[in-house]
Amino acid sequence: MVEDWSERGRDELWLARVILTTVLIDERTDYEVRSKLYDWSRNPRGKPGLGGLLVSICATELAVGHPKQALIRLRWLCDHRSPTAQSARAAIAELCEDNRTLEQFLAVLTDRDRFDSELCRSIVTPRRLTGIPGRPSPLAVRRLAIKVVETWRLALDRLSPTDWSTAVQPWLEQHALAAANDSQAEASALLAAMLELCGSQVDLLAQLYTTNRAWLASGELAGWRRSAAAGVENAIRDALAVKPALSLSLEGESR
């Protein structure tokens, strides 16, 4: 009935939502309904009317009592055709404005054999990692910061140098904006996270060095951009202090 009504008209879609909501909040039927929501979400060939209904139910009623289950179903709905996939991504992004939900999402994202690098980069953006009044930056919570770095390492893994640089440039931009706005703690956290993304891999530190220079050259040469880029470059050089061979090669590039 719900599947049929969700594809008819606005009135029938409203009735389908009322039915689903009613049985979802009833403790006698909620388990079966949550299982059915999961089954529907796993079908990437689902129809758009039902898909939109599932996104709405998962992002509201289900997310209130079972946030992780809601994220799991929305994660599967991202594999559907648009507009369902687009709506699911938007719903995840909105739910992840809460740091606790973001932490749950990172667990959901890394709990599948097929890791979705693009979904990670679209939800866990450097801008999202900044703090706002009433919500600290995820990077200020060490446990969460570690999970963010681990997940982003997976997102960057196996990217070509060009794609790697494209993915990392928003980090450089956000770091520069934080520094320009005198948010030094935030800027330091973003810079530390970038270095942790590279870990002890010399090739990735060199790639970050090259990306930083490309980012600076790609925009206006304002003082705040030059200052931020210099800070990143100095941090990379400090990290490479025990790597004299590469340090010499970077010195050559700067001449």
Image (cartoon, grey):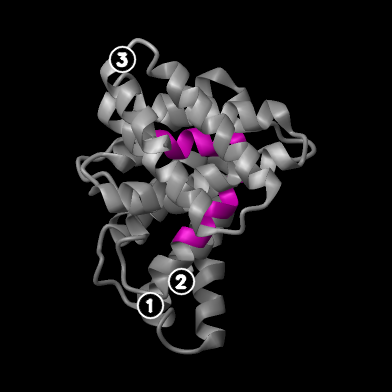
Which residue in the structure is indicated by mark 3? 243
Quarter assignment of residue 48: bottom left
Is residue 31 visible in this depiction of the protein?
no
Residue at figure coordinates x 40%, y 84% from the top left: 7
Query: In the rendered view, does 160 fall on the left or right side of 71?
Result: left
Residue designated by label 1: 48
Q: Earlier in the sequence, mark 2 or mark 3?
A: 2
* Residue drawn 25% across the image and 66% down it: 44
Residue type at tag 3: Lys
Q: Which residues are magenta?
A: 89-108
Residue 52, numbered label: 2
Kindly state the secondary structure of the residue where label 1 is placed. Answer: helix
Q: Is residue 104 magenta?
A: yes
| Mark seen at residue 152 | none
Please report contact status of discs 2 and 1: CB closer than 8 Å, yes or no.
Answer: yes
243 or 74: nearer the eye? 243
